[in-house]
Image (tube, rainbow, N blue to C red):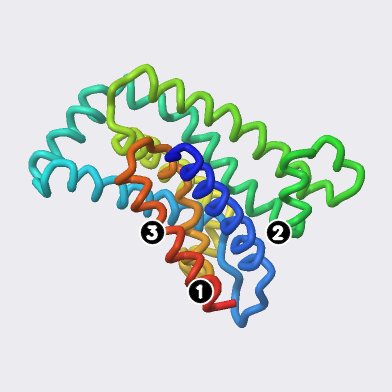
Amino acid sequence: MLKYLSLGILVLQTTSLVLTMRYSRTLKEDGPRYLPSAAVVSAELLKITVCTIIVLVQNNWSVRAMNQQLKEEIMNKSSETLKLAVPAGIYTLQNNLLYVALSNLDAATYQVTLKYAACALCQFTVCGVMAVLMACVSSGFAGVYFEKILKETKQSVWVRNIQLGLFSFVLGLLGMLLYDGESVRQSGMFQGYSAITCVVVVLQVKHLLRVKCFNNLFVIMLLCFGNMCYICKTT
């Protein structure tokens, strides 16, 4: 039962992410549009924050115990931490590619292309399809690699997500400064942010779905339900 419930929540989260991301990229507003690279960085920062809070709760709200655990698992096991650099880089690339794809394709085309990208190459916008292709391939490789690391070690999945998020945050920040540095200097990192942009950022924290216990799943269910209620209210 829990397996099917997890699958349902995953489908709900993925579908709502695609729809809200597409809506946010086509929404006409006064002023500059938000930067996809900044949204990716914000999502990684949010993921790190949420995972850190959960680790704190698991340590009975003891900041000292949490710091000790994070130091032991991240700093003292640097070789294990470095393994996460590979999927972190791929996930960062993938998240940026999703914005490219949904800026050039409608939501329905994106979903179909994600499954049958090879057949759609000659029918739709090349830029968007190529972005979906690369995102699909990179997502598959990174997902398998990440699961392999989780199974080979006994570290908490939340600590692993913090490690993953730290690399992704740094790489995303470098990418933002490289490609959108001028826009950030002129109008700031959060230019064009709106309520729907914040919903997209929250939904992007999909790595939090890589859990296997009911309590964690319950938290995710509440987050997804709250996001869907907010989307229905604002659209």
- Spatial CA distance of label 3 from label 1 is 22 Å
Label located before the other in sequence (2 or 3): 2
Position in image of residue 213 (x %, y %) = 33, 38
Q: Classify mark 2: helix, strand or loop.
A: helix
Residue shown at the point (83%, 46%) measured from the top left: 126
**Disc 2 marks which residue?**
103
**Disc 3 marks which residue?**
222
Given contact means CB atoms under 8 Å apart, are the residues at marks 2 and 3 in contact?
Answer: no
* Screen quadrant of the N terminus: top left
| Residue 42 numbered tag | none
Q: Which quadrant of the view contains residue 85?
A: top left
Label located before the other in sequence (3 or 1): 1
Tell whether 212 sits left or right of 110. left
Q: Crowdedness of circle 2 by 10 Å Cα count: few (<14), some, many (20+)?
A: some
Closer to the camera, 230 or 64?
230
Position in image of residue 167 (x %, y %) = 40, 37
Tell whether 91 sits left or right of 170. right
Closer to the camera, 29 or 144?
144
Judged from this view, the residue extending furthest toward the front is 1
Residue shown at the point (52%, 52%) measured from the top left: 176
Amino acid at circle 3: Leu
Q: Nearer the viewer, mark 3 or mark 1?
A: 3
Closer to the camera, 223 or 28?
223
| Residue 194 numbered tag | 1
Q: Crowdedness of circle 3 by 10 Å Cα count: few (<14), some, many (20+)?
A: few
- Spatial CA distance of label 2 from label 3 is 29 Å
Residue 78's place in the image compared with 177, above or below, is above
Residue 70's place in the image compared with 179, above or below, is above
Residue shown at the point (78%, 53%) measured from the top left: 109
Position in image of residue 120 (x %, y %) = 86, 42
Residue 198 visible in the current orientation: yes
Tell whether 15 sits left or right of 107. left
